[in-house]
Amino acid sequence: MDGWYVDDRCTNCDVARQLAPGLIAEADGKSQILRSPRDEAETRSLYAAAFACPTRSIRRASGRIDQALDPFPMALDNGVLICGHNSQHTAGANSYLLLRPSGTAMMIDTPRWSPELASRYAASSPVTDVLLTHRDHAAHGRRYADHFGARLWIHEGDLDAAPDADQVIRGLEPVEIGEGVTAHPLPGHTRGSVLYLADDRYCFSGDSFYWSRTTSDLEIADSVTWYSVEELAASLARTVGRLRCEWVLPGHGDRHRLAADEMSRRLRALAERASLLRPRPIDFTAVRW
């Protein structure tokens, strides 16, 4: 495929398939290249997949990929950038930069750590806060916050994963943490999972729910819900009526944009389906990407 291939380090995290869905697919428990890019846009999407891949498994037989074609941070719309450079220490989770009207930004979860990347993200906008959605994504949080001179946030339920956090979200009630930005505690995936809602437009859902390309709907990865799927159902029942957004931006699984009324309908339906879920053994292969 024009010298592109996926090496055997692939962990089937889905990151590359999100960025180049027509070029990369899942087969036998890992990603594989389907075909060569046909135009410049497809070439850019394949390079984005390569630079996001946490194991650097998207490769060219001709050698190292051109660093000048690294697109990250990459705009999703005029208010959010995706960081790329996903980290193996967060199981390959996506992270984001939320741009604020003041000219600053908030980082939601973290990409892999490097000083060069940190400087690149700060060049987009000065970062004032690093918001952790839960314990699984706490890696690199302190290093990024210190580099930016930013505040590090986490919920008390997962505080042992970031005991040196500057701001601790407590209890179950929503907390305004910045102008237009609210933290909604959402225990379930972990005890201290949090959803961040910004500007009635962006919903950073962590690992609580995501958009599935398989079902074309919002889904819960109940087979990898570590704390309690019943608690997650209760959290959603308590919270979805307070949410209004267009974008769902998860850590794992795909992101998606819908009209706000339609997204609200989907969130209510998700909460109803979640109420029927019961615990089951951990099974990464059961996630419906």
Image (tube, helix red, strand yellow):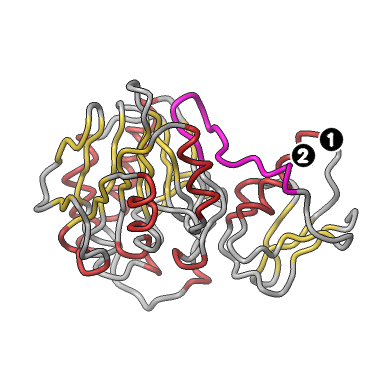
Label 2 sits on a secondary structure element that is helix
Q: Amino acid at mark 1?
A: Asp
Residue flagged by tag 2: what amino acid is it? Glu
- Would residue 3 be found to the left or right of residue 72 on screen? right
Tag 2 residue: 42
Indicate left or right for 193 with 172 as reference: right
Q: Which residue is mark 1?
A: 39
> Which residue occupies 66% across, 73% down?
9
What's the magenta region? Answer: 67-82
Quarter in which the C terminus is drawn: bottom right
Secondary structure beneath dot 1 equals loop
In the image, farthest residue toward the bottom: 281
Q: Quadrant of residue 96?
A: top left
Relative depth, front residue between 45 and 215: 45
Question: Which quadrant holds the N terminus?
Answer: bottom right
Depth check: 160 or 246 in front?
160
> In the rendering, at what x and y percent does residue 46 appear?
73, 47
In-front residue for pair 189/167: 167
Residue shown at 32% from the left, 22% from the top: 102
How many numbered marks appear? 2
Q: Magenta includes 76?
A: yes
Residue at image x 43%, y 25%?
259
Determine whether, in the image, residue 11 is placed left or right of residue 28: left
Residue 79 on image: x %, y %? 44, 27
- Residue occupying the point 29% across, 72% down: 279
